[in-house]
Amino acid sequence: MIQPDDLLTRPVRAVVAGARLFADTLAAQAVPVVPVDWRPPLAGTEEHLVRVLADPRRERANAEAVRRVLAAQAQLVDVRPARAALGVEPGTFLHAGPPITWERASGPMRGALIGAMLFEGLADTPENAERQLASGAIALEPCHHRGAVGPMAGVVSPSMWMFELADPVHGGRAYCSLNEGLGKVLRYGAYGPEVIERLRWMTAVLGPLLRDAVRRHGPVDVRAIIAQMLQMGDEGHNRNRAGTSLFLRELLADLVGGGAPGDQVAEVVRFVNGNDHFFLNLAMPACKLALDAARDIPGSTMVVAMARNGTDFGIQVSGTGDRWFTGPAEVPAGLYLGAYGPQDANPDIGDSAITETAGIGGFAMAAAPAIVRFVGGEVPDALATSLRMYEITLAEHTAYQIPVFGFRGTPTGIDVTRVARTGILPQINTGIAGRVAGTGQVGAGLVNPPVECFTAALAALADAAPPLG
């Protein structure tokens, strides 16, 4: 046992938790310092944490959730219109994020819905479309409720073509629309003539040619492409250059050999090759397949969806079924296009945070240091972000690996209790939509979910836990 006098005669060694200034001051005086990375839990969560951490089902439930996520496969098996793939009928539109009404919809969500009305021929002017939408004549439903995901506004109408992915391990299916490219596009809330014309070409040419190529080729292993693209400098959310190239290479012979007119094939190849984000709309349903496999496990604290509708940010948790836990979506911090700035930005929007939920995207930024040129920050920030995400996840992915970390698996399986205990929020990298309907994309950046999502989810998990004692 150390005696009081020993403090004056023996070398001092300090263990410091939290107070960085104190630690730096001691280190400057050559005092050995042992830093402890400790943070208080999120305010007001202590009682709920005790209940959830004491749940005897939790450890086994989370192990099962992890097992299912890591075992899930993702194969592109078809390309079909939404009316055939998802049963979307005229007068019904799907959208990104948790449920939303027209009255609460943000500018880009409203713009995308107006554009979908014009595209489907349900209105002849934007004003007429807006009147119908405001009247409640159009049904709105989250993409997630139909087994789909949609980037940004995520609006899906019956005539839009969808990628259809299958998980042969668990039997699941997931869907996503085809990627339009960047700039003034429907998913960012633009609805001008060029947007509608592009959607019509995608319906008449792009969708049918991709369908024929996929059916001729047979299932395309999307999970294998994701694993490879992480080795090639992509992170799977805002950088998909390698993934798009790998996908096009996989299907090119079947596109060319399908007997379609040469000018149409050339158009499709140019469009996909010129759109570095084309593969995002395949990565998203691949991630949804994995996370859907982990749903509905009593006692599990794993997050199985993060999604935003431009007004609300919502999460779903394995152990609480289809219930959404929401909070106000925040405006991303990042880089802006041209003369746009933060005043032009809409709060966070889109289902694409399913990538982070599955362990890629913002969680894998260390695999794609060039991403900082698109979303802001410096290369060390990308590395530090991925390292920080290991603190709030349950596992490391066995297929998705980060080369700079010695091929360590990406941090996978966000744990509500670890978020609450550390105060660390998931990091998402994302595009930024203009807040005014019709604007389109104004930038790209980084954003976190609101704390309220996780405190509410933790409370629900505590309510569902067996009584203590």
Image (cartoon, grey):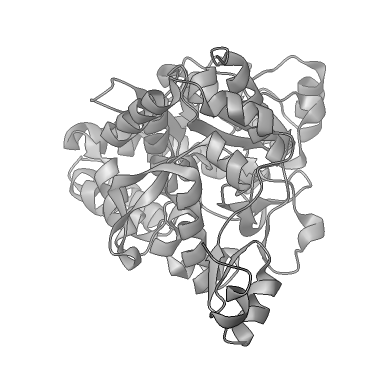
Residue 73, given in percent of the width and then of the height, sits at 27, 34
* Residue at (26% x, 55% y) in the render: 228
Q: Quick one: 72 or 277, which is closer to the camera?
A: 72
Q: Looking at the rendering, which quadrant does residue 325 occupy?
A: top right
Up the image or down, 344 lies above or below 66; here it is: below
Q: Quick one: 85 or 100, which is closer to the camera?
A: 100
Q: Quick one: 383 or 3, which is closer to the camera?
A: 3
Q: Quick one: 412 or 270, which is closer to the camera?
A: 412
Q: Residue furthest bottom?
A: 29
In this rendering, position of residue 406 left or right of residue 4 = left
Residue 30, given in percent of the width and then of the height, sits at 57, 86
Q: Is residue 126 visible?
A: yes
Total numbered circles: 0
Residue 26, given in percent of the width and then of the height, sits at 64, 79
* Residue at (22% x, 49% y) in the render: 250
Q: Is residue 95 visible?
A: no
Query: In which quadrant is the C terminus drawn?
Result: top right
Q: Looking at the rendering, which quadrant does residue 99 occupy?
A: top right
In this rendering, position of residue 331 left or right of residue 252 = right
In this rendering, position of residue 242 left or right of residue 309 = left
* Residue at (73% x, 40% y) in the render: 43
Up the image or down, 246 lies above or below 373; here it is: above
* Residue at (48% x, 24% y) in the render: 318
Residue 457, given in percent of the width and then of the height, sits at 62, 27
